[in-house]
Structures are given as C-alpha cells and as structure tokens.
Image: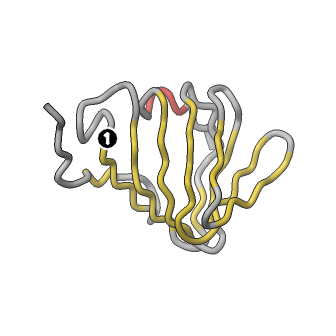
Amino acid sequence: MPQLISAPTLIPVPGNKIIEEFIGHVNSGDARVSIARMNSPAGWSEPGQRPDFDEFSVILKGTLRVEHEAGLLDVKAGQAIIARKGEWVRYSTPEGAEYVAICVPAFTVDTVHRDVP
C-alpha cells in the first residue's frame, strides 16, 4: 500500500535555513533516500562537507552557490546540480534560494562529514 506523507518534519539546523524533510530518516524512517525542501535566506552559508551520499538539488527560486575543489558554480532557478559521494562541496545562498534536495542514501549528520571550523 502506498504511504502518504501528510506533512514534512522541520529539521533543526544552525542559522536561519529551514529544512522540511518529507522522506528520510526523521520523517518516514527511510534510510535509502531523503527528500527535503530547503528555504535559505540571503547570506546563508554552511561549512564545507564531503558526504557519504550523492546529493541531487533542483533549484525552484533564487540561486544556490556551490563551491567545490575546482571552483564555484551558481545554480539558478530551473537548473539542477549533482554533488557526488566523496566530493567536497560548500553550499551558500548569497541572494536566497528555495530548492529540493535528494540524498541517496538518506542524509544523516554522521555521513555528511562537515568541515570542522
């Protein structure tokens, strides 16, 4: 039987970014994939990371800036980006953004491997 996800769970994160997890460890108990809507205000950024999962992001509004070891990409509304497992990336939203992030396998704090400040 299909499983209805009636609402996302708000995932607490430092700063003023809003993460609404629809599918994943927290909201649906699924370890295979996580699907979340991200709302990041202008000026938001997070530490770099080298995750143990692939992350697929589809930008709905604004621009997601993705720093990587070879440079920088600005991913705009209507575009998408894939960050592969083991690649170092750092996300920020200089002008703000709304996007959907899909992680395979599902995101966990233990597998994101954020840089230590």
Give percent across and percent down for residue 94: 66, 70
- State the image quarter where residue 58 is shown: bottom right
Q: Which residue shows up at 63% across the image and 52% down it?
A: 80
From this viewpoint, which residue is outermost toward the left?
1
Question: Left of 29 or right of it: where is 81?
Answer: right
Question: Left of 45 or right of it: where is 11?
Answer: left
Give percent across and percent down for residue 27: 24, 41
Quarter of the figure that contains the N terminus: top left
Camera-side residue of 112 and 77? 77
At numbered mark 1, what does the secondary structure look like: helix, strand or loop?
A: strand
Camera-side residue of 3 and 21? 3
Q: Is 6 placed above or below 88 here?
A: below
Q: Is 5 placed above or below 111 here?
A: below
Q: Is 115 placed above or below 100 here?
A: above
Query: Label 1 belongs to which residue?
Result: 23
Q: How many marks?
A: 1
Quarter of the figure that contains the C terminus: top right
Give percent across and percent down for residue 28: 23, 37
Give percent across and percent down for residue 114: 58, 37
Q: Which residue shows up at 44% across the image and 34% down it?
A: 107
Q: Is 51 placed above or below 71 here?
A: above
Q: Which residue shows up at 65% across the image and 58% down it?
A: 79
**Colour treatment of the image:** secondary structure
From this viewpoint, which residue is outermost toward the front?
1
Q: Which residue shows up at 65% across the image and 32% down it?
A: 84
Q: Amino acid at mark 1?
A: Ile
Q: Residues within 10 Å of mark 1 (few under 14, many from 20)?
A: many
Question: Left of 94 or right of it: where is 108?
Answer: left
